[in-house]
């Protein structure tokens, strides 16, 4: 069966660019279809010969029908078309070799939300005027590549022709020389890591890799989301959620925040889960200029030119314990939370700038006062540091227990 690259955009404003992308893909030897996701009431343009799949056809895939999309309210229309596109892509996934979208702020939000519903491993490229900023919400937990347009997408010019041609060739390369996602040969585990918990995760991977296929996720906001996407899809059978620093950023305004739904998939799936307080001693910001004024008198470590770390206070650690405890109370599967009383990160150790036993104790009190322990759901304390061999041994033993 022939497969196609879907070239997606709003043809009412970007038809010229869409046609150029299709011609570049044809030159590269790749078949493609142009999909119109315009949210205007369909006109003759949507049925024009240059468009392969008109917006009216996409809109019919919305559970509420086309009228839920063509509602004449921009925000609702964009969300409606995005939902319709998601359903269309899932229903036609066997026909798709790759996805390439173009758009400004509205088009990028519309198209990438639909791309996020597609399997990891399917090539996805979003050419966007928004790609030079924070793209976390556009990428989500999947493998979407973002390419900045430099100029606005307002007709073709010498620069946009080149950038769009490069984009087409990127996708053509992925299609012509792509690799089919391997099937896992061993049970797959998910682990979360930050630079300051790397020694712990490296020890765990070394001990587990002969029996399992460990996937390590960088806890930078979307790392946890990526892992939980794979858990929900049934690709991960057990979790070593050692590094929950994204939650500190969520609660206290850091730049590497997870979503409010963090840990909900553990309750849904009841997967075996061992967690810990990795890097909860810090909140992440960009350069010094990015730090909110209310934090001016706090304790900081300059991790590099782009990352500044702020020490969490005892009060904040107590709140973190309460938040995590409330989430874990929803989990009826096998859950263990291990508190490393010797330190939560490489910076939270004797002689290091974030060493603070009072803050660690406050976290333990917040978690202990909130989390309802059962035979399946337990808190375990150890005097050792999170990066110590003793802590690793305890994690491995408890993981065997939950399995």
Image (cartoon, helix red, strand yellow):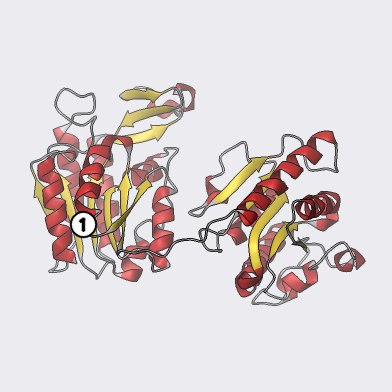
Q: Position of residue 66 (x, y in %)?
A: 74, 74
Residue 373 shows up from this direction: no
Up the image or down, 26 lies above or below 117; here it is above
Which residue, given by chain and number where applicable, does mark 1 sit on?
Answer: 370
Q: Residue at x 37, y 44 (%)?
A: 219
Q: Quadrant of the N terminus?
A: bottom right
Residue 142 drawn above or below residue 96: above
Q: Quadrant of residue 93?
A: bottom right
Front in this rendered view, residue 103 or 146: 146
- Residue depicted at x 71% and y 77%: 65
Q: Is residue 177 left or right of residue 4?
A: left
Which residue sits at x=10%, y=40%?
Answer: 384
Q: What percent of the width, then of the height, locates residue 124?
A: 61, 54
Q: Nearer the viewer, residue 96 or 291?
A: 96
Tally the numbered discs: 1
**In screen coordinates, is 118 left or right of 246?**
right
- Single out the residue that lies furthest toward the left: 383
Front residue of 5 and 118? 5
Closest to the observer, 74 or 282: 282
With respect to residue 107, does 356 lie above or below?
Answer: above
Query: Would residue 47 be found to the left or right of residue 357 on screen?
Result: right
Place residue 358 in its image quadrant: top left
- Label 1 SS: helix
Residue 153 falls in which quadrant of the image?
top right
Image quarter (top left, top right, bottom left or bottom right) of the C terminus: bottom left
* Position of residue 395 measured from the top left corner of the image (x, y, whole percent): 16, 52
Q: Position of residue 102 (x, y in %)?
A: 72, 50
Q: Residues within 10 Å of mark 1 (few under 14, many from 20)?
A: some
x 21%, y 62%: residue: 335
| Residue 159 in view in this figure | yes
């Amino acid at each position: 069966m022939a497969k196609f690259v879907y070239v997606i955009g709003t043809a009412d404003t970007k038809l010229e660019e869409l046609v150029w992308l299709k011609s570049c893909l044809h030159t590269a030897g790749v078949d493609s279809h142009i999909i119109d996701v315009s949210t205007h009431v369909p006109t003759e343009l949507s049925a024009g010969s240059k468009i392969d799949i008109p917006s009216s056809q996409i809109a019919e895939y919305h559970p509420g029908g086309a009228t839920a999309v063509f509602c004449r309210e921009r925000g609702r229309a964009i969300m409606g078309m995005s939902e319709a596109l998601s359903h269309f892509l899932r229903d036609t996934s066997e026909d798709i070799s790759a996805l390439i979208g173009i758009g400004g702020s509205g088009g990028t939000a519309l198209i990438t939300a639909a791309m996020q519903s597609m399997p990891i491993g399917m090539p996805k490229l979003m050419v966007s005027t928004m790609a030079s900023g924070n793209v976390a919400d556009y990428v989500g937990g999947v493998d979407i590549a973002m390419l900045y347009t430099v100029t606005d997408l307002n007709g073709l010019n010498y620069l946009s022709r080149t950038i769009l041609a490069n984009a087409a060739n990127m996708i053509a390369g992925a299609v012509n020389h792509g690799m089919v996602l391997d099937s896992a040969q061993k049970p797959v585990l998910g682990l979360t890591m930050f630079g300051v918990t790397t020694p712990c995760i490296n020890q765990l991977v070394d001990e587990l890799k002969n029996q399992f296929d460990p996937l390590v996720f960088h806890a930078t906001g979307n790392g946890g989301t990526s892992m939980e996407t794979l858990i929900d899809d049934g690709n991960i059978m057990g979790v070593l959620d050692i590094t929950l620093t994204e939650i500190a950023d969520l609660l206290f305004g850091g730049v590497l925040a997870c979503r409010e739904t963090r840990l909900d998939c553990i309750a849904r799936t009841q997967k075996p889960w061992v967690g810990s307080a990795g890097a909860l001693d810090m909140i992440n910001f960009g350069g010094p200029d990015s730090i909110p004024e209310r934090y001016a008198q706090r304790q900081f470590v300059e991790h590099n030119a782009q990352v500044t770390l702020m020490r969490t206070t005892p009060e904040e650690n107590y709140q973190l314990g309460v938040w995590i405890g409330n989430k874990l109370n929803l989990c009826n599967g096998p859950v263990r939370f291990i508190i490393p009383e010797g330190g939560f990160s490489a910076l939270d150790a004797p002689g290091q700038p974030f060493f603070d036993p009072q803050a660690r104790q406050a976290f333990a009190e917040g978690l202990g006062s909130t989390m309802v322990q059962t035979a399946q759901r337990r808190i375990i304390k150890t005097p050792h540091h999170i990066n110590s061999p003793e802590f690793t041994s305890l994690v491995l033993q408890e993981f065997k227990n939950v399995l």
